[in-house]
Amino acid sequence: MVASPQACESSMPLPIFALAVASFCIGTTEFVIMGLLPEMAADLGVSIPAAGLLVTGYALGVVFGAPVIALATANLPRKQVLIALASLFVVGNLLCAVAPNYWLLMVARVVTAFGHGAFFGIGSVVAASLVPRNQQASAVALMFAGLTLSNILGVPAGTALGEAFGWRSTFWAVVLIGLVSVASIAWLVPRNVAPPSGKGIAGEIRVLGSLQVWLAMLTSALSSCALFAVFTYIKPILTGVSGLSTPDVTWVLLLFGAGMTVGNILGGRLADRRLMPTVIGTFSALVVMFVIFAEIGTQPVATVALVFVWGALTFLAIPALQLRVMQTAEGAPNLASTLNQSAFNMGNAAGAWLGGAAISAGLSYAALPYVGAGTVLIALAVALASIAGDRLRAVAQAST
């Protein structure tokens, strides 16, 4: 029998800590490649934009793998599914570490990504089930804290490790962290936590008939697209536009991760109070931030400070966006929550492609933040449309 939310509240940090360890491992693998693009490109004999497609390949693996795994595991115990997904991630990183060429590395990245989306989707439902409704965004944020901490500790350390001993050493380190995450989930997560919804695969699929679910996921995708259109190429921007040295990039990535952590924690609390206003306010601030980034990119001190703000604003909206999808799919949230991870990563893939396409078309690295600003404006419009849909539904329900 699953403990009540009141009983679980005091012990919530322990099971969510286990999920955070795994999200730390996942985040390190997902983001560290940005700091190692030039080294990987040189070692594999490809261009930097081609190496950037490893980001796209990973994201597409999440996009297509997540719903398949979510449906295949819809009726299985959540804890066992989480352990299996974390184990898959370990195996995938092991394959990345030993891949002898570019194309086998691409395959290994896709295999790794298959466990990503389903883990965060199911993990979000598990985290939210452990607390009262008015703390669910904070619970999701706490699980995602591992992802943000990976950008403070995992990504800078992985970048430095890869620069010192070769990029493969970074993936070996992630394998070890992944083994710790598997053990943590097995030890700390309650055995019968967050049982399946009871509506089965058909019920999970029926939820996808809601326009509000799709608008929520589209908002998530566009927010990630804006991030990755610029962040995928952060190293050449910082070194080629801002004039920072290669070792300095490691510390700037650390600062970005610190901003993500602050934004994630604050975003969870704000979303528990006012969910959609948090999204609207954050997107509006991101548009302004990207424009300023484009204008002051040649000033290293100002750019470094802005990177912290960028990280904070990026993750300020993440708990709200994840919870929004879960709420619009209430009653059968597992597939929709997992598909939202696919949406985030579809945005990652689109953003990496969009940034690369803009550069290939002649846009300078200095002007790339304008692409991010335009994408956020579209996300803002979709979020406002979603709010309008809520109001129309409320009026319709009141009149019946």
Image (cartoon, grey):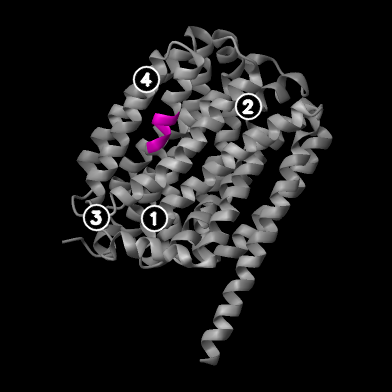
Mark sitting earlier along the chain (4/3): 3
Q: Give the foreground label among 2 and 3.
A: 3
Check disc 4 and report its element: helix, strand or loop: helix
Choose between 6 and 210: the one closer to the eye.
Answer: 210
Q: Please name the amino acid that badge 3 sits on.
A: Asn
Mark sitting earlier along the chain (4/1): 4
Choose between 307 and 335: the one closer to the eye.
Answer: 335
Residue at 60% across, 25% down? 52
Q: Please name the amino acid that badge 4 sits on.
A: Leu
Magenta span = 110-114
Q: Is residue 94 above or below residue 89?
A: above
Can you identify the residue that label 1 sits on? 335
In this picture, residue 25 sits left or right of residue 313:
left
Residue 236 shows in this picture: yes
Q: Is residue 128 above or below residue 361?
A: below
Q: Give the foreground label among 2 and 1.
A: 1
Can you identify the residue that label 4 sits on? 95
Measured Cα–Cα span from mark 2 to mark 3: 43 Å
Could you tell me if the residues under marks 2 and 1 are in contact, i.e. CB atoms within 8 Å?
no
Mark sitting earlier along the chain (3/1): 3
Q: Position of residue 15 (x, y in %)?
A: 28, 47
Q: Residues within 10 Å of mark 2 (few under 14, many from 20)?
A: many
Mark sitting earlier along the chain (2/3): 3
Q: Main secondary structure of the magenta part?
A: helix
Q: Residues within 10 Å of mark 1 (few under 14, many from 20)?
A: many
Residue at 44% across, 44% down? 144
Q: Position of residue 53 (x, y in %)?
A: 58, 27
Q: Residues within 10 Å of mark 4 (few under 14, many from 20)?
A: many
Can you identify the residue that label 3 sits on? 75
Measured Cα–Cα span from mark 4 to mark 2: 29 Å
Residue at 77% across, 37% down? 293
